[in-house]
Image: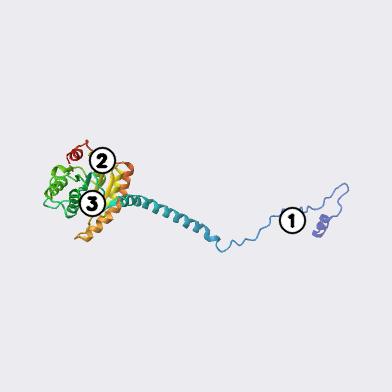
Amino acid sequence: MSIDADAQADEGTPGPPGTVRTAAAQPAAVPDDAVPQQSAPQDAGPHHASRPPRRRARRRLLVAAALVVLLLVPLAWVQGTGQAGLRTLETVDDAPVALVFGAGLRPDGSPSTYLRRRLDAAQSLYDAGKVSVVLVSGDNGSVGHDEPTAMHDYLVGAGVPSASVVLDYAGFDTHDTCVRAHRVFGVDAAVVLTQDYHVRRAVFSCTAAGIDTQGVGVSSASVQPEQLTQWKLREVAASYKAWWDGLTGRDPVYLGPAETGVQDALRGS
């Protein structure tokens, strides 16, 4: 049979008797709505591609802002609390105690320039009758370095009675001095005397320790301006430490037993 004949037979030539022919299989018709339609890409707009980067940038900005706030809150807390307690020698209210922080000694063992200014302010308050006792607190942790004794001798030499000057030999830092003043010496109210860049932190630390605190800042003018800049920068870091010490209630390096020196001096004044 030729190819054409085969094709004709396939197209409908009757087969042998008794044979049932079927039409060639045709693909079933599929409704138009059943055929998946490929939609044309929608115009996402000119800003579509930039949305994820913008969201990431916004999140980074929010995180950065939160970190800045977290960093500023302790500093603002310390400085704000200190600012509220600032006074001058003329405007300070009467208080039982003037608290003087140590500030280094000269090679000959006498008070440094900064320390003398603090002690001079304490003497002024004592002479004016605004305080009855001067508590001098400093470091006596090494041989030949005895801040409290040097402070005592300076005040006595300036005319303050020895009985009115009480010595704290374990004032290793501002926080320790304040905590010991309250817990060891029983001071509930005081005027703290220190340099103007340090006085806010001192007021904060003593307030956190439980003392009703006023602060008088004395001059920080220095013949070494670069050193003063270093101290002011150090004060920022020290403010964070003061905030943490106050928040956690850290004990002093050396707390020690209660002492009656301040109370005895107040009774004798």
Q: Quadrant of the N terminus?
A: bottom right
Sequence-first disc among 2 and 1: 1
Determine which residue is flagged by label 2: 182
- At label 3, the amino acid type is Thr
Element assignment for label 3: strand
Q: Residue at x 14, y 48 (%)?
A: 155
Residue placed most toward the observer, 201 or 244: 201
**In screen coordinates, is 40 left or right of 143?**
right
Q: Residue at x 19, y 48 (%)?
A: 126
Residue placed most toward the observer, 123 or 119: 123
Residue placed most toward the observer, 179 or 107: 179
The answer to whether residue 182 is above or below residue 75 is above
Determine which residue is flagged by label 3: 194
Q: CA distance from mark 2 to mark 1?
A: 91 Å
- At label 1, the amino acid type is Asp
Q: CA distance from mark 3 to mark 1?
A: 91 Å
Sequence-first disc among 3 and 1: 1
- Residue situated furthest top in the rendering: 257
- Residue situated furthest right in the rendering: 17
- At label 2, the amino acid type is His
Q: CA distance from mark 3 to mark 2?
A: 18 Å
CB contact under 8 Å: marks 3 and 1: no
Q: Looking at the image, is mark 2 or mark 1 nearer the viewer? A: 2
Residue 3 visible: yes
Element assignment for label 1: helix
